[in-house]
Amino acid sequence: MKYLNYITAFLLFIITSCEHKNIAETPNRQGIIADKAMVVSAHPLASKVGLEVLKNGGNAVDAAVAVHFALAVVYPVAGNIGGGGFLVYRTNEGEYHTLDYREKAPAMAKRNMYLDSDGKVIDEKSRLGHYAAGVPGSVHGMVTAHQKFGSKNWGELLEPAINLARNGFKLTENGASNLNRAQERIEKYSTVKPENLLHNYWNARDSIQYKDLAETLTRIAKNGKAGFYEGETARLIVEEMKRGKGLISFDDLKGYESIWREPIQFSYKDYKITSMGPPSSGGVAIAQLFGMIEHFTIQDWGIDHINTIHVIAESEKRVFADRAEYLGDPDFVQIPIDKLMERKYNQLRASEINFEHASMADEIKAGNFGKEHEETTHFSIVDQYGNAVSSTTTLNGGFGNHVVVGGAGFFLNNEMDDFSALPGSPNMYGLIGGEANSIAPAKRMLSSMTPTIVEKNGQLFMVVGTPGGSTIITSVFQTILNVVEFNMNLQAAVDYPRFHHQWRPNYIQYEKGRFEDNMIEILNELGHELRERTAIGRVDAILVLKDGKMEGGADPRGDDTALGF
Ligand code: DON
């Protein structure tokens, strides 16, 4: 019976994945409007937790901490304490701070750890099970952000998450099907079977509890970083590693540090855009995309014009070719950020775009200027004082490596797959990389996460980000374009079907409804191959309107929810 249910769940997943609605059919929708403060996250209960913190006078960082831990409970497919992420913060005075709490390779990691004796990549070794996990950064990141900018008591901010874990909450339909889909793997890869998740066919509105996770969160609430990186939680992680032949040690945990990085900042027309720097490729990549697109009159052409689509796809190819060559952990490799973001360089790259024909992937190389089902989650928050947080966090794949830490109740990431295991060999997002993103002990794997904040005339304008692996970069880029070039309400900009090109594989991926049939024909004639796919990203964003009120843009592709007051 149990297996019949799994099969039904799998079939339902296939059917619902194929049947996603034509989002283009909902024109210029407006999201909820708030006067003072707003939180947009992937789950209604997490947004509610954030809203309460904001209403009680907490600031955006307080709310970010509470939302982050709530997501670790109610949205375990991506919300986490066993993963990592990035946070972009803008104070109400216009100062920026960007925090890197990305996972690190364990000290015992080796460059060729995912290759067999013939030098070939061993399928799934970097994706499933203990060996795929990087040293988690999330708890360190939240404590660090809170110590510098939080105003409310740390322990109190974790209370809602602890209560949700301990007392249980009702699953959404997506939450239930996520768990049903992952059960076999969770059972296979967890050395201590998490009874609260297994042996049950989950339906929407079923109640689920995470008692071990409640205890782990309580230790973090009491002891901060030490509640995770030392003591009982560290012991449980290291024991789990020993049972499953993973690499994370006590020293890896104790030595983990999140790092304040230099923000990536650039201007595009009247807008100043701030995003995350390496080890995320997101900020540099969108800087390059805007730097190429600004040489074309896409506003006059319009969002569905062939030239607009062609120019966007061709720019995206070039940016991903650069990403593969140059981007990696800045503590390990020299990244020519200034060169990559230089106006002249991107103008030159843009001038290579041929309007007669799409370029073949082989024709595109990284620019030469002299060398010197997947899940993540994003939330956007603006508080009543005018501070803003844009934060993206992940386990990498849905439920990470599918290992629940025995006795501690949380999933570990499979972020090691974001390294380039072998030059030219694609990772789970089809991304390739080389030396700059090769594996080394204690190195951070390259990310595409792009938490971003946009200013207009010196004022906060937009807070935006999304999950989606490699498509994160192009979804953030296209959502901003939808608002600033194509005049859409924020909700419509988020709803609008997206497309994506990442150089290799050499085709445009697109959501149903993005292109009319005749447009597909024209793009084919130009030399573009196109492949329709399931939903791209879950953009959660906030837009400050002319009257100072805010519009929330919660992605209808998931359970994403905007709440404000
Ligand atoms: O850091 C990255 O780029 C990836 N680990 C993000 C994974 C992701 O977005 C999966 N979500 N759909």
Image (tube, helix red, strand yellow):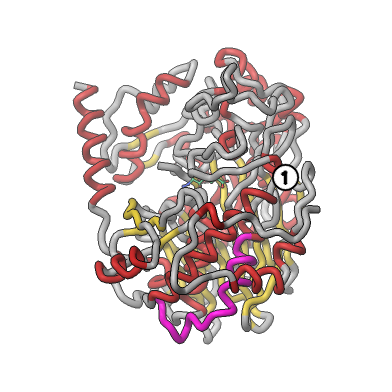
Residue range corresponding to the magenta coloring: 285-303
> Among all residues in the image, which is located at the extreme top?
243
Quarter of the image holding residue 294? bottom right
Look at the magenta stretch and give its main secondary structure.
Answer: helix
Quadrant housing the N terminus = top left
Q: Can residue 395 be seen in this view?
A: yes
Q: Examine the rendered structure and indicate whether residue 297 appears above or below residue 18.
A: below
Whole-percent x, y for residue 395 in the image: 53, 39
Query: Mark 1, residues whose alpha carbon is within 10 Å: few (<14), some, or many (≥20)?
Result: many
Q: Please check the rendered image and state whether residue 295 is part of the magenta-colored stretch, yes or no.
A: yes
Foreground of the two, 324 or 215 = 324
Q: Examine the rendered structure and indicate whether residue 56 appears above or below residue 410.
A: below
Residue at screen point 42% across, 25% down: 186
Q: Please check the rendered image and state whether residue 106 is part of the magenta-colored stretch, yes or no.
A: no
Residue at screen point 67% across, 54% down: 152
Whole-percent x, y for residue 320 in the image: 57, 55
Numbered label tally: 1
Whole-percent x, y for residue 376 in the image: 50, 46
Residue at screen point 73% across, 74% down: 93
Q: Examine the rendered structure and indicate whether residue 169 appears above or below residue 452.
A: above
Q: Does the residue labelled 1 lie within 8 Å of ligand 1?
A: no
Q: Can residue 211 be seen in this view?
A: no
Whole-percent x, y for residue 455 in the image: 63, 76
Q: Which amino acid does label 1 sit on?
A: Asp
| Secondary element at tag 1 | loop
Q: Examine the rendered structure and indicate whether residue 179 appears above or below residue 192.
A: below
Quarter of the image holding residue 301? bottom left
Foreground of the two, 273 or 529 = 529
Residue at screen point 55% across, 31% down: 412
Foreground of the two, 303 or 67 = 303
Which residue is label 1 attached to?
329
